[in-house]
Amino acid sequence: MLNIRDLRIDPASLGAKKLLVDIAPAYEYKDGKRTDTLTGYRYVVALPEHALEKLSVKIDGKQLMDKPDGFAEVEFSGLEVGVYETKEGVRFTAKATGIALVNRKA
């Protein structure tokens, strides 16, 4: 039987722009409970092509950039997006290996 957790979403479907709006620490969970062990950071991006819906992208390791004042356009390397189901409905999960600011030239 097909498991919803085995499905992957094409990152291109998120749209061309990803606007970094927040950064939060990500912790390890054991037996469904959060521990004090820091595993990485969650980079929260707003997606303009999806009515500014937000997506949290986890990157393991040290914090790679500071939280912007307002927002900053970023791109992810190694971005993988998946889906899972809870009692509340379908949820998205995302992880990446890196993040960088986008420098657009006028």
Image (cartoon, rainbow, N blue to C red):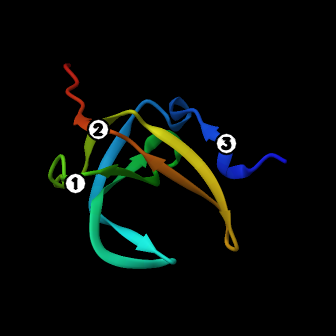
**Residue at 61% of width from left, 39% of height from top?**
8
Q: Nearer the viewer, residue 4 or 48?
A: 4
- Is the residue 49 above or below the residue 87 in the image? above
* Residue 93 locus on image (x, y percent): 52, 53
Using the rendered view, name the quadrant where residue 30 is placed. bottom left
- Is the residue 94 above or below the residue 105 in the image? below
- Is 65 displayed left or right of 90 in the figure? left
Residue 7, numbered label: 3
* Residue 32 locus on image (x, y percent): 51, 77
| Callout 2 secondary element | strand
| Callout 1 secondary element | loop
Question: Going from the N terminus, do you reach mark 2 or mark 3 first?
Answer: 3
Name the residue tied to disc 1: 70
| 1 or 2: mark nearer the eye | 2
- Is the residue 32 above or below the residue 46 in the image? below
* Residue 41 locus on image (x, y percent): 28, 57
Q: Amino acid at mark 2?
A: Gly
Q: Residues within 10 Å of mark 2 (few under 14, many from 20)?
A: some
Question: Going from the N terminus, do you reach mark 1 or mark 2 first?
Answer: 1
Q: Which quarter shows the C terminus? A: top left
How far apart are the two marked residues, 1 and 3, measured between alpha carbons? 33 Å
Farthest residue to the right: give it: 1
Name the residue tied to disc 2: 98
| Callout 3 secondary element | loop
Question: Going from the N terminus, do you reach mark 1 or mark 3 first?
Answer: 3
Q: Amino acid at mark 1?
A: Gly
Farthest residue to the top: give it: 106
**Residue at 39% of width from left, 34% of height from top?**
17
- Is 102 displayed left or right of 85 in the figure? left
